[in-house]
Image: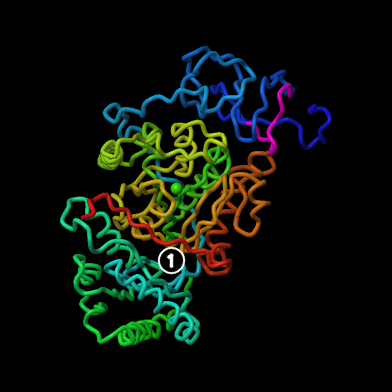
């Protein structure tokens, strides 16, 4: 194949993020063959797939490989200008030491306020605002999950159609509650998560907990303090039929209340946006995540709350984050969460390198350092105003680091517990990810994915790579889309299809 024979739109394209970088990313969707010559004289020595790195200079054995002006590894063997660089010829270094970081040394000043943006939401008694009007039925133990599934089918068929202002009924089922070391210090994580999940702003404050009766996690522990109604135990009722009737009765009482609710105009400041990525590729850090980062800055300027997460995907970029902490306490909390996770992984006999997937590598990411540098682009440029331990409820506004594993479903579940009312999910490889509790806007890193999965991807950040759009343009498009989706004016693809993944609790404590 000869590059000269290709149509003009297939001219070889590459992106170098920083002038300091000695690698660039190949943009062409089908990759580029060996012998391809760029206008500046760079000639490819190998076929280089889409999203993969090409050496812009000779790199000596053991010398640094730079992307995003950061060292992503060192050369394994001599690398020549024009060589394909992938996980085989990159040696990954160690993570930044946690005791040598700049702590809150360069917090960015508050942005100029962005005013005049609103959405139509459901205001709650506790001051939060929902983007949907959902009844959640929580459960205190896995034993009742099958019963809830049965009840939910009947609720959706028999009750929900009579209450047209209620968007949905969801069951918060999980694998916790019994057979667990409930007094272990780390049991605080799953228990706090379940407590706070039931109070997500999209559930309107109507908490109902179904329990069994003999479990360790008693249903009352999942109710907000001071609330003593809203629980039932299956073992208190005569037979399965009576249990289902009791659940339906309690559900209908709450549907009647939620059906009275109406959307009202509220400031964009009421948004609590959870951000994460999944199925990342080398474009994640060039297109979707920087656009989301720009959007995060807009949301912060509008007074909203924006959460980024995924400890193993910020660990290798932590030296870029601790200087941005608003205060020394926030920087200390960032380090505390990194240290906790280092030790969690260490106890399991792995390190943060266990994060990258075969799909990440196929998409051009050589290791977790490169993946992390692209991942933290989501956080934009604002000061980090607070840090949450896994499952803690968000307090205050601005850019918040909510510590979670990077696993998509665990991260999403923890961000729901922290109180997000809308989720933005960036993906390079593609995933049908969705959550029942909040709208999930999926942003693709590449146009090829957006075209192939046109009925799953809500926004395409790919045109940034081809120069057709800027990061700022896509960031504004996403901001407007968030306001439309939060208002119920636009429906995300996951909701159109009803693609809702199960909740997945993070339980770092022992199971008995
Ligand atoms: Ca993830």
**Picture coordinates of residue 240, whole percent (x, y):** 32, 83
**Who is closer to the viewer here, 498 or 292?**
498
Give residue 325's quadrant in the image.
top left
Magenta-colored span = 26-36
Q: In the picture, which quadrant includes the N terminus?
A: top right
Q: Residue at x 36, y 44 (%)?
A: 384
- Please say if 103 is above or below 71: below
Q: Residue at x 36, y 47 (%)?
A: 405
**Picture coordinates of residue 420, whole percent (x, y):** 40, 59
Q: Residue at x 19, y 71 (%)?
A: 214
Q: Secondary structure at mark 1?
A: loop
Give residue 41's quadrant in the image.
top right
Q: Residues within 10 Å of mark 1 (few under 14, many from 20)?
A: many
**Picture coordinates of residue 299, whole percent (x, y):** 47, 53
Q: How is the image coloured?
A: rainbow
Q: Is residue 320 magenta?
A: no
Q: Main secondary structure of the magenta part?
A: loop
**Who is closer to the viewer here, 81 or 291?**
81
Left or right, 468 with reference to 78:
right
Give residue 244's quadrant in the image.
bottom left
Left or right, 131 with reference to 430:
left
Label 1: which residue?
437
Q: Residue at x 57, y 30 (%)?
A: 17
**Picture coordinates of residue 86, whole percent (x, y):** 55, 27
- Please say if 244 is above or below 29: below
Q: In the picture, which quadrant includes the C terminus?
A: bottom left
């Amino acid at each position: 194949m000869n590059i000269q024979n290709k149509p003009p739109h297939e001219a070889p394209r590459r992106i170098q993020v920083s002038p300091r970088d000695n690698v660039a990313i190949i943009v062409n969707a089908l990759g580029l063959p060996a012998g391809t010559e760029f206008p500046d004289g760079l000639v490819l020595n190998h076929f280089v797939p889409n999203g993969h790195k090409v050496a812009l200079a000779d790199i000596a054995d053991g010398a640094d490989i730079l992307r995003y002006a950061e060292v992503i590894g060192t050369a394994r063997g001599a690398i020549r200008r024009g060589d394909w660089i992938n996980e085989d010829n990159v040696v990954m270094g160690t993570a930044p030491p946690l005791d040598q970081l700049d702590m809150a040394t360069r917090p960015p000043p508050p942005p100029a306020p962005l005013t005049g943006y609103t959405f139509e939401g459901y205001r709650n008694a506790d001051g939060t605002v929902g983007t949907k009007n959902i009844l959640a039925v929580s459960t205190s133990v896995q034993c009742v999950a099958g019963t809830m599934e049965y009840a939910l089918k009947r609720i959706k068929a028999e009750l929900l159609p009579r209450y047209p202002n209620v968007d949905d009924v969801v069951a918060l089922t999980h694998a916790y509650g019994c057979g667990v070391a409930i007094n272990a210090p780390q049991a605080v994580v799953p228990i706090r998560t379940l407590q706070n999940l039931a109070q997500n702003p999209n559930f309107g404050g109507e908490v109902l907990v179904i329990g069994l009766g003999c479990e360790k996690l008693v249903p009352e522990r999942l109710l907000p303090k001071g609330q003593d109604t809203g629980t039932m135990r299956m073992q208190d009722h005569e037979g399965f039929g009576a249990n289902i009737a009791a659940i339906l009765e309690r559900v209908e009482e709450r549907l009647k209340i939620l059906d009275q609710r109406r959307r009202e105009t509220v400031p964009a400041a009421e948004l609590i946006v959870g951000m994460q990525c999944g199925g990342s590729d080398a474009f994640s850090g060039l297109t979707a995540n920087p656009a989301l980062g720009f959007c995060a800055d807009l949301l912060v300027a509008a007074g909203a709350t924006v959460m980024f997460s995924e400890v193993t995907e910020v660990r290798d970029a932590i030296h870029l984050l601790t200087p941005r902490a608003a205060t020394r306490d926030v920087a200390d909390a960032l380090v505390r969460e990194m240290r906790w996770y280092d030790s969690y992984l260490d106890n399991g006999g792995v390190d943060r390198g266990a994060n990258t997937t075969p799909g990440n590598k196929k998409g051009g990411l050589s290791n977790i350092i490169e993946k992390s540098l692209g991942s933290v682009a989501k956080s934009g440029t604002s000061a980090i105003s607070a840090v949450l331990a896994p499952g803690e409820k968000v307090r205050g506004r601005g850019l918040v680091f909510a510590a979670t594993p990077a696993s998509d479903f665990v991260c999403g579940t923890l961000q729901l517990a922290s109180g997000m009312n809308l989720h933005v999910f960036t993906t390079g490889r593609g995933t049908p990810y969705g959550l029942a509790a909040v709208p999930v806007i999926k942003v693709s890193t590449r146009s090829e994915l957006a075209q192939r999965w046109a009925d799953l991807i809500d926004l395409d950040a790919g045109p940034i790579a081809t120069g057709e759009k800027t990061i700022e343009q896509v960031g504004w498009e996403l901001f407007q889309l968030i306001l439309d989706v939060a208002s119920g004016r636009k429906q995300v693809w996951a909701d159109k299809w009803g693609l809702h993944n199960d909740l997945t609790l993070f339980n770092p404590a022992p199971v008995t």
